[in-house]
Amino acid sequence: MAGVDATSPYHPTAKPSKSTSALFNCKKTNLYTLLAFLCIISYLLGAYQHRNTITTNTKTTTTCSQTLTLTPTTASHLDFSSHHNATFLPPSTPKLHYPPCDTSFSEYTPCEDHARSLRYSRNRMVYRERHCPEKRELLKCRVPAPHGYKNPFPWPASRDVAWYANVPHRELTVEKAGQNWIRYDGDRFRFPGGGTMFPHGADKYIDDIGTLINLRDGSVRTAVDTGCGVASWGAYLLSRDILTVSIAPRDTHEAQVQFALERGVPALIGVLASKRLPFPSRAFDMAHCSRCLIPWAEYDGLYLNEIDRILRPGGYWILSGPPIRWKKYWKGWERTKEDLNEEQTKIEKVAKSLCWNKLVERGDIAIWQKAINHLDCKANRKLTQNRPFCQPQNDPDKAWYTDMQTCLSPVPEVSNKEETAGGALENWPDRLKATPPRIYKGTIKGVTSETFSEDNKLWKKRVSYYKKVNNQLAKAGRYRNILDMNAYLGGFAAALIESPVWVMNVVPVHAKVDTLGAIFERGLIGTYHNWCEAVSTYPRTYDLIHADSVFSLYNNRCELEDILLEMDRILRPEGSVIIRDDVDILVKVKTIVDGMDWDSQIVDHEDGPLERVKLLFAVKNYWTSPDKNS
């Protein structure tokens, strides 16, 4: 199967397109002609040889008949029964079936479950962190979409509007009514682009930031928004080619991250509490907090220290809201002048201990910049009372259930004050194709500049083949939110860069090498994850999921059906899946997905049928919870 008709909806078991079939038919015709010719020649030669054989055999038989008496065997004496049967064969494997979960699970987030979170401490928001179910608690059913669910609006319309039935929560429309976050309008929500600190719209707010730092030259490409609301800041940065990961906990502001994802904006459920955020060190060009209510100065500056870890040398931290401009807003914030002044003084002190430079404070916005290296920081330690550096064994890239630290994560060594630690990056879009510093400096074992170049070529070829099999992948608007479950160097995402999509690149914690830092250095985004656990996201997050060798990696680590049920949870109705893996693994996978009511088909590798690696293309069927009134 090489393709499907570009005018018809994608279906994994569809036949090849007419143009492709015509090409195959032409080849088949030539082949059949050749075969027919060879058959005729073979027949003539065989007939000639057979004639000579018959003559010889006849003579021999006539001679022997004078001395041999042949006794014919009657057919009644032949025994056609089998006598060596396997008497204890195992019964055939029953067909799997995974029923729908109860409608109460339509927004189930296994590792951020409210009932489970109540078992944990409220100190430092620990109860808002990931707390995953034990194996015996895992659901063996399919999470339903709410009744009336519709396919989200295509990008860019989705930035401003979403179906109410998909995220049936109106709490924010009341709580944030005066701040232009979100409005309820009949059967849909509208997003005017406002926020608590930018009621006149995120676009104008970003323009204000753009007068203070350059957001247009490509030097700022990746950003993280902590306490993101409905992610309007990240949504409007996309028009400036800045890709933002928006983060918010699952808390009293119901469905913040869910609204962000419904709008087609990258987002994760997350919180600054006791564990590091699931990103490598030196990942983001810019970090942002707009009245995010994170106690930055508390716990010896623990949370600002974590922002420092994930900020690239020379990166920016932007703060608006309390305590910035407290002299104007203190009455509205219902706090005393002394309290707000003390908070800002503490934040300034923590920023200095991190060797940050305060660039500007103008209006409602303050911006700090991380040093491009630590030469001055080390030289002035005794004078400035900077915080101690972390020990070498404290890997700054280790960020999966890793405790936050108050020590300063060291950046790579440099030879002079003007050199950027870890290597300077190209501006976007050149950054995408340039060899990441982590690779050309040899810090990723077994990955070289040549490896990187070949990987780019490989994924261009593979994605081209994907588009032949799934014609919808080449159509703008069919897919928006994409997940790559085993991204390696981000080649799959890079090959899709011209499409109006974003890709969450996952580097599994069990991968042979940690390549997530290099993915960020390309100007792409991603996260660490263990696929034996659920993802920190809402159901129905992704339009398309790509899994390269994931099931081989996790075979015997956890149950394949649990990974597939998690994929089903986070895949939208009528969403698509592409799985690459060894054929034996894929056969097992297909048995499971058939029981999940997916339409699927295994097709050959792009290099032909002799490759052991095959591809499984699948589509999740549309279904929802029943109507409560029916």
Image: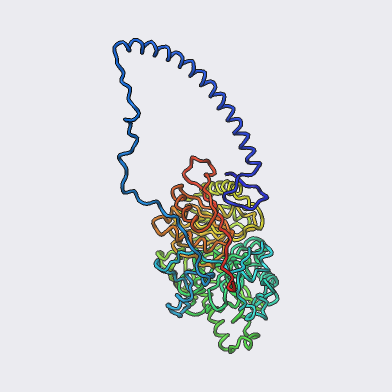
Compared with 152, 578 (above or below) is above
Compared with 122, 148 (above or below) is above
Q: Quadrant of residue 572?
A: bottom right
Report the front residue among 131 and 124. Answer: 131
Report the front residue among 586 and 410. Answer: 586
**Colour mode of the rendering:** rainbow
Q: Position of residue 624 (x, y in %)?
A: 57, 65
Compared with 49, 169 (above or below) is below
Q: Position of residue 568 (x, y in %)?
A: 52, 61
Q: Is residue 315 visible?
A: no
Q: Is residue 498 visible?
A: yes
Report the front residue among 290 and 286. Answer: 290
Q: Is 536 left or right of 337, judged from the image as shown?
A: left
Q: Is 54 left or right of 330, judged from the image as shown?
A: left
* Picture quarter with the N terminus: top right
Q: Position of residue 401 (x, y in %)?
A: 43, 68
Residue found 44% across the figure and 57% down from its top: 560
Residue found 62% across the figure and 58% down from its top: 479
Residue found 30% across the figure and 20% down from its top: 71
Q: Position of residue 605 (x, y in %)?
A: 52, 44
* Picture quarter with the C terminus: bottom right
Compared with 476, 127 (above or below) is below
